[in-house]
Amino acid sequence: MTFSYERTVTTTADPAAVWQLWSDISTWPVWDPAVQEVLLDGPFEEGTTGTMTLTGPIEVPVSLEVVVPGSRYLDQLTMGDLVIRIDHVVRPLDGGGSEVTVSTTIEGPGADDIGPMVTADAPVAMEALILAAEKT
């Protein structure tokens, strides 16, 4: 089973401001209500692994599968037989500002059931991210 969810928003914030929040894992709990803590075993770059503590608390392994500094990262969480991939992309807009897209794909047994729960806070997280980026 596979579940997919995608959301795109625009902001007056520069892509660099969005990237700064994404690449600084200490900010994640500030703008994402589902995240309590993220600990990485290395720098914010492709291949780095660590743990993410989600609200619950639930501790899950996390890995950075793709990191394109300034524009994109894809992290992967493993929860039992479920694999959750969250792709984050920021693009500059003509005339200033940014377009921010976050895509979530969940694969494994029960993905269709857990997907709506996993992505329920996505609009709240994106709004908080955008507000924080616009303040920088």
Image (spheres, helix red, strand yellow):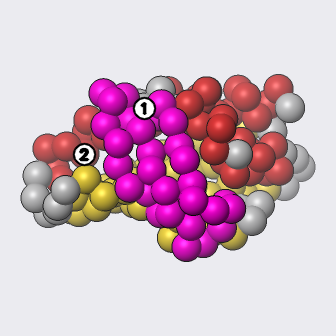
Q: Which residues are magenta?
A: 35-63
Residue at mark 1 to residue at mark 2: CA–CA distance: 14 Å
Magenta stretch encompasses residue 76: no
**Percent from the top left, x then y, of residue 70?**
77, 61
Q: Which mark is residue 34?
A: 1
Mark 1 vs mark 2, foreground winner is: 1
Camera-side residue: 116 or 22?
A: 22
Residue at the farthest front position: 41
Badge 2: residue crowd in 10 Å (few <14, some 14–19, many ≥20): some
Question: How packed is label 1: few (under 14 Cα within 10 Å), some, or many (20 or more)?
Answer: many
Q: Which residue is mark 2?
A: 115
Give me the residue at 38% from left, 55% from top.
61
Query: Does the segment drawn in magenta span residue 49?
Result: yes
Q: Residue at x 50, y 63 (%)?
A: 49
Q: Amino acid at mark 2?
A: Gly
* Camera sees residue 96: yes
Q: Is residue 112 above or below residue 116?
A: below
Q: Main secondary structure of the magenta part?
A: strand
Q: Earlier in the sequence, mark 1 or mark 2?
A: 1
Can residue 87 be seen by looking at this rendering? no
Q: Residue 89 sits in which quadrant?
A: bottom right
For the residues labelled 1 and 2, say whether their Cβ atoms are less than 8 Å apart. Answer: no
Quarter of the image with the N terminus in it = bottom left
Tell which of 75 and 2 is nearer to you.
75
- What residue appears at the point 86 percent right and 32 percent down from the top-left corner? 136
Which residue is farthest left?
109
In the rendered view, tell whether residue 25 sits above or below residue 123. below
Amino acid at the residue labelled 1: Ala
Q: Secondary structure at mark 2?
A: helix
Res 106 → quadrant: bottom left
Residue that lies at the very extreme toward the right in this rendered image: 95
